[in-house]
Image: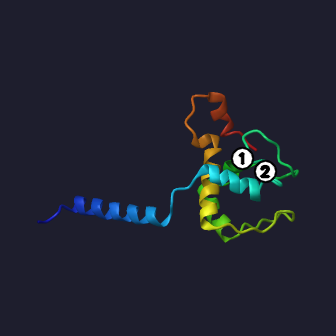
């Protein structure tokens, strides 16, 4: 029996999605917060309204304004290095990175559905 091209494409896509899901387990924002508490909180604010412990360290909740959160994944995997002299070079495991990125997405107000127009306006405020 011959399958139509669209059906073959759907089967191939399903197999690909299934393979990717097997390689990368689902990320957990709660575990990502734990990573942030252990690795970031010494300098950066990690919550929705706390202040950074180190002057000039941007709160994690504002990172979406500077970077596409998913683009940070590679930087976290390969060891984040920045020009700031007090920012340590650190390395995270792939699972830790997945969880941290999930946490960053969870605190990104622009990634959340909202009917709060003031909150949505803050998504586009300059830093």
Mark number displayed over residue 58: 2
Residue 98, picture quadrant? bottom right
Q: Seen in the image, is 99 located left or right of residue 24? A: right
| Residue that appears at 78% across and 69% down | 89
Mark number displayed over residue 51: none
Secondary structure of the residue carrying numbered label 1: helix
Which x, y percent locates residue 106?
A: 61, 45
Which x, y percent locates residue 42?
A: 83, 55
The reply to whether the C-beta atoms of the residues labelled 2 and 1 are less than 8 Å apart is: yes
- In the image, residue 24 sits, relative to residue 121, either above or below, namely below
| Residue that appears at 88% across and 50% down | 55
- In the image, residue 67 sits, relative to residue 109, either above or below, namely below
Residue position marked by numbered label 1 in the rendering = 62
Tell me the CA gap for discs 2 and 1: 7 Å
| Residue that appears at 60% across and 52% down | 102
- In the image, residue 51 sits, relative to residue 22, either above or below, namely above
| Residue that appears at 69% across and 36% down | 122
CA neighbours of label 1 inside 10 A, class few (<14), some (14 to 19), many (20+): some
Q: Seen in the image, is 17 located left or right of residue 12? A: right
Residue 72, picture quadrant? bottom right
């Amino acid at each position: 029996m011959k399958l139509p091209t669209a059906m073959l494409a759907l089967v191939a896509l399903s197999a690909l999605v299934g393979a990717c899901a097997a390689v990368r387990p689902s990320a957990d924002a709660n575990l990502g917060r734990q990573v942030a508490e252990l690795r970031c909180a010494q300098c950066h604010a990690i919550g929705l309204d706390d202040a950074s412990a180190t002057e000039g360290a941007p709160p994690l909740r504002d990172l979406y304004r500077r970077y596409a959160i998913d683009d940070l994944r590679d930087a976290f995997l390969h060891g984040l290095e920045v020009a700031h002299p007090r920012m340590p070079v650190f390395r995270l495991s792939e699972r830790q990175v997945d969880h941290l990125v999930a946490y960053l997405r969870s605190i990104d107000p622009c990634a959340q559905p909202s009917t709060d127009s003031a909150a949505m306006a803050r998504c586009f405020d300059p830093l």
